[in-house]
Image: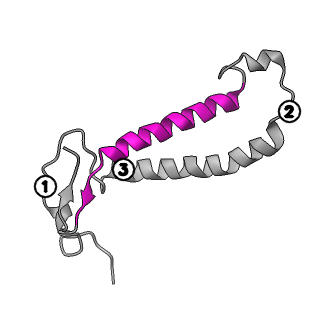
Amino acid sequence: MVLSLGADVLPEYKLQAPRIHKWTVLHYSPFKAVWDWLILLLVIYTAILTPYSAAFLLSDEEDASTQSCIYSCSPLNVVDLIVDIMFIIDILINFRTTYVNANDEVGGSS
């Protein structure tokens, strides 16, 4: 049996044009799928690097020069800041993403 994405296998809500705001992201759009994979990779990065940096990179006695430095001293700090910003953007995108209710209708934020 060959899998196809024809009208016979797609859920009904994917066949109808939802009435949503132009800034709302469809939960089944290619953008949302790629975004979710990117966030998954960032979560795996965080899950691996946070314990590693806590165990091996943090020291009890830091130099006075690095204490005054916020995010410009270590490239790892810059990457962590970017990951944090991506997680905040993910929260905002999820607030603007559609969902399927109990009646198989696409709902979204208004």
| Secondary structure of the residue carrying numbered label 2 | loop
**Does the magenta segment cover residue 46?**
no
Rounded to the nearest whole Å, what is the CA distance between mark 2 and mark 1?
58 Å
Rounded to the nearest whole Å, what is the CA distance between mark 3 and mark 1?
17 Å
Badge 2 density bin: few <14, some 14–19, many ≥20, Cα 10 Å? few
Please identify the dominant SS of the magenta region. helix
Q: Quadrant of the C terminus?
A: top left
Residue bearing the label numbered 1: 17
Q: Give x and y (percent) for residue 97.
A: 30, 49
Tell me: 46 left or right of 53. Answer: left
Tell me: 39 left or right of 93. Answer: right
Residue 60 has which mark?
2
Badge 1 density bin: few <14, some 14–19, many ≥20, Cα 10 Å? few
Q: Quadrant of the N terminus?
A: bottom left
Residue bearing the label numbered 3: 32
Q: Which amino acid type corresponds to the residue marked 3 in the rendered image? A: Lys
Q: Which residues are magenta?
A: 74-101
Q: Residue 18: name its quadrant.
A: bottom left
